[in-house]
Image: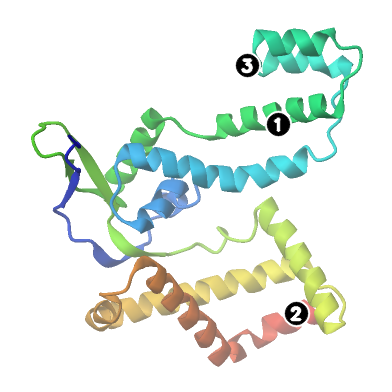
Amino acid sequence: MSLPEPQDVITYEQKPIEIVKEREKVEMFYDQGYWPILVILREGPLTVREMTVKSNILIEKKVRPELDKKFKDYQVTKEKLEDILKKITTFTAEEKKQLRDKKTLSESDKKLVIDRIKDYKLSKEQKSEKTIYRYVKDLSLAELIVAAGQRVIIGKTATETLYARKAKIFIIRQHSDDTWNCEECKTTLDKVGKLLALSMDIKQPKVEHLAKLMSSIDMFHEDEQIRLFEQFDDEVKRIIKDCSFKETNHLLTTFKSIYLVLKAEEFKEEIKSCFK
């Protein structure tokens, strides 16, 4: 006899749009603990258990390439091995003995050790269900996510709470010093500058000039979206009401691209400073 299928009972009607202006709430969208939850809840209501699994998958997609790059040229020597075996707890006693007994390490041995190091470091980045629950509680107190209903199984009293983003779309009100100043942003802009120099056969623009331009573009888009949603709230809600999360994101991205082209003249001086 098959078990009854769980049913989701949704009691919260998600808002189409929420403008986030408070600094402490804006910072949650960039926090390493909170951002995966806010991203995966774009899919719709989820339980804490589901959020834990999906958050860790998202974290792995971000962290794994970084670890692959970091350990690309890492050399495993017999001198380093003992220290590695003490730190990395996933080696079995038999594996440790075999590695210690070898006079030299084969390429497959080195690959095993490096893979275990990367897996161990990834596990340190990933979160437990208890931690995700704490993040959910914090995000709920900040009114960025809400308890949206229950997952129930007919005939059983136990239920799981379903959580959802308060709104389909969060328009985040940045502050001028929030964006494009991190080390990762600077690295990205340096590479963008190199691509622009190749593409346009020009001198590579300075990172600080590109950072200023991109911050201005971000603020420009946010100002316009906030004006649009505040001035035409009902009209915008009607336009996006039946859009999926994917459609909504695509709609806004397309709108931003076309709007930027139409208003490019406003960035004339900043563009000049980048390419003078």
Q: Is residue 46 above or below residue 113?
A: below
What is the secondary structure assignment of the residue under circle 2? helix
Q: Is residue 61 above or below residue 108?
A: below
* Camera-side mark, 2 or 3: 3
The residue type indicated by label 2 comes to Ser
- Please report the residue visible at 25 percent of the width from the left and 84 percent of the height from the top: 235
Q: How far apart are labels 2 and 3 at the CA level?
A: 53 Å
Q: Quadrant of the C terminus?
A: bottom right
The residue nearer to you, when weighing 175 against 195, is 195
Residue 124: quarter of image:
top right
Left of 100 or right of it: where is 39?
left
- Please report the residue visible at 43 percent of the width from the left and 44 percent of the height from the top: 54
Residue where numbered disc 3 is placed = 89
The residue type indicated by label 1 comes to Asp
What is the secondary structure assignment of the residue under circle 3? loop
Q: Position of residue 126 (x, y in %)?
A: 52, 35
